Image: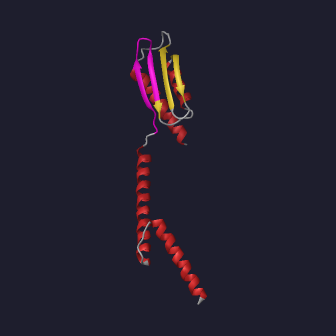
Amino acid sequence: MVSRIHKRTAMYRNLQLLRSIRYSHSPPKSPVLLDLSNCIQGLKQKLQELNQLTARKIADYDPMPKLEVEMQEEGFVIKVLSERSCQGLLVFILEAFEELGLDVLQARVSCADSFSLEALGNKEKNEDTGALDAEVVEQVVSKAIQNWREVSEI
């Protein structure tokens, strides 16, 4: 008899605890359990929606750096921007500058949390090299970025 009373008291305490968690004041046992069951289902559904949203955002995220080349009187202004840090990208870009025969007159680079490069490049003075325009510079630097991307994915 005493065991039955202890069990009933423990069950009543657990029921009170469940009611306090759910803020339910309904007296019967089943509505509290149904409320909690519905609450858990709702939380599972919200979690699943958040996971799907996160997966979509990750799929939409394009880690490819943005490239912009402008022709100016002094030479070319080359801007490369990325929302993430791009380890090793600077080397590929500098090799592209060398391939083009560009002298870097001035540059600002940041590689901490994101990648940012702004460089002013001028064509070296050689007789055997042809004219250089912004489109050619953009193609060569873009190819360097693509090569970096292929190497960094390995």
Residue drawn at x 50%, y 72% as measured from the top left:
16
Which residue is situated farthest in the bottom direction here? 1
**Where 76 sits versus 114, above or below?**
above
Residue 37 in the image, given as x and y percentages of width and height: 43, 70
State which quadrant residue 62 falls in: top left
Residue in the foreground of this view, choosing between 51 and 81: 51
Residue in the foreground of this view, choosing between 29 and 102: 29
Residue 105 in the image, given as x and y percentages of width and height: 52, 15
Q: Which residues are magenta?
A: 63-80
Residue 100 in the image, given as x and y percentages of width and height: 49, 20
Residue drawn at x 51%, y 77% as measured from the top left:
12
Predominant SS along the magenta part: strand
Quadrant assignment for the N terminus: bottom right
State which quadrant residue 154 falls in: top right
**Where 118 sits versus 148, above or below?**
above
Residue in the foreground of this view, choosing between 88 and 38: 38
Residue in the foreground of this view, choosing between 77 and 150: 77
**Where 119 sits versus 57, above or below?**
above
